[in-house]
Amino acid sequence: PTHTHTLQPYNPENKTSQQGRSYSPRTDIYRSARLLVKNNTFDATMTSHVESLLWDIFAHVKIASSSLFIGASNYFYHSNSNSWGRQLAGDSSPESSLSHEFEDITNNFEDHSMADSHAGDGHGDDHGGSVHISYEDLYASIMFFACIYVGGQIAARLLKMPSLVGEIFVGIFLGPNLAAYVPDPVSFVMLGEIGLILLVLEAGIDIDLTMLKLIGTRGFIIAIIGSILPIAIAMAIAFAVGTDTAGSIAAGASFGPTSLGIAMNILRQGKIVNTPVGQLIVSAAVIDDMIALIILSQLGALAGEASLATILIPIFSALGFLIIGGYIAVFVLPPILDKVFYPRISKENHGSAGLALMFLLLFAMMPATYYAKSSFLLGAFLSGLVFCRKHEVHVRFVSQFKRLLQWLMRIFFAASIGFQVPIKDFGDAKVIGYGLLFTLALTGKLAVGFLVPNFNNTEKFK
């Protein structure tokens, strides 16, 4: 049955209507809707709950539209460049009219539309900080990704070489030094560097302390000789061809480090990361990077105003983070986490909690090592080393970052390495000759291989 009720104007001092029926206002909107009606009186016959809902919606819309109109009127009235609001308020002038103001607003809107359309062709730095990309840049980036993948597969499947070889050549051919096809190459280099940080972080988690004990002091000696010997050979070659001291040090330092990105990629494809040889190569690569960084810091001191601080700070910083930081990461922090941190978390969440804590440590160690004149990659390695005994963290890291890391490393080889190759200079016979001459420095790396102990127990290698 239909029930009809006559609604009386709301009286805030009396919560009972004239019919004596108890009344409780549902919302402030409902109250305002009644007050907005002319003379504050109206009679409405509501025959259902649907009609009540419609009246609520009507009141809400009426209040919102009124507020919007009042706000717009105040804005136009107080604006020095617009007299439309003044005309609405009764402050009109003979020389202006609403039609002229409407035309100005229309033209202003068209100007903004044209500016936005032109912003799509660039980066939009001058349009409120918004960033726009063009279709051509988007298409070129997607094609670059596809070429990286295809180049890696051709190298791996057809040429039987590591996939990184094909990825580097794609970066050389499409990069800024040759075809200049890739848009905004700096962005791709940054993505590659992010991939390298994640890779070094995983290298720290991958360290097997039991196997590292098998390597012992010989592993440390191999890392030192494997860095110093190539540097010395390269410096001798540079001095022999008439290069000055600073140039000779720079040439030597370029042969010192072992690329951890390339090493980890090859060790993974060979499935020997967790073997004694693999652990030896990873640890040696970290030490090589530290030594090369110390040498480069000394080169910077020679190029500028050398002081005792600029010479000693990088050396003590690198050694301090490697020795003291490595000891804390292996022997101090893990027991503390086992006693204080993990007992407060359920066992099934150990992997996720450890992963979050590892990234917090990474965010602290990277700036600490960088501003202390050491390598931020060493900070990433130490952050992962803290959790090398926690298998759950490693499993969680792989499950979350495996695919992402694969693509970031492809970009690293193509952009961070491939973009840096000055391929156009390879047409100069002098450059080719010096390049072949300096490759003799790599014999220092090969000679270190004879110092590696025999970890293979098969008859063939005894």
Image (cartoon, rainbow, N blue to C red):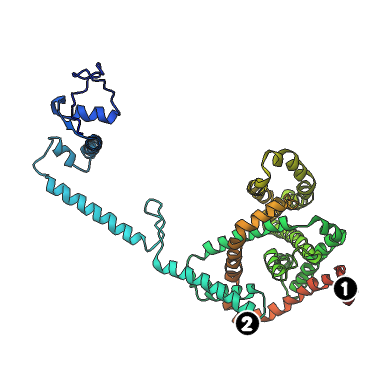
Q: Residues within 10 Å of mark 2 (few under 14, many from 20)?
A: few
Looking at the rendered image, the disc whose residue lies closer to the viewer, 2 or 1, is: 1
Please tell me which residue is depicted at 56% across the width and 61% down the height of the picture: 191
Residue 135, disc: none
Pinpoint residue 358: horizontal percent, then vertical percent.
66, 48
Do we see residue 345 in this rendering? yes
Residue bearing mark 2: 158
Q: Contact (CB < 8 A) between labels 2 and 1? A: no
Q: x and y percent of residue 81 in the render?
A: 22, 43
| Residue projecting furthest to the left | 94
Amino acid under label 2?
Leu
The residue carrying pointer 1 sits among few (fewer than 14), some (14 to 19) or many (20 or more) residues within 10 Å by Cα, namely: few
Residue denoted by label 1: 458
Q: In the figure, is residue 403 to the left or right of 386?
A: left
Callout 1 amino acid: Thr
Q: Residue at x 67, y 80 (%)?
A: 160
Distance (Cα) linking label 2 and label 1: 32 Å
| Quarter of the figure with residue 281 | bottom right
Q: Going by the image, does 322 lie left or right of 88?
A: right
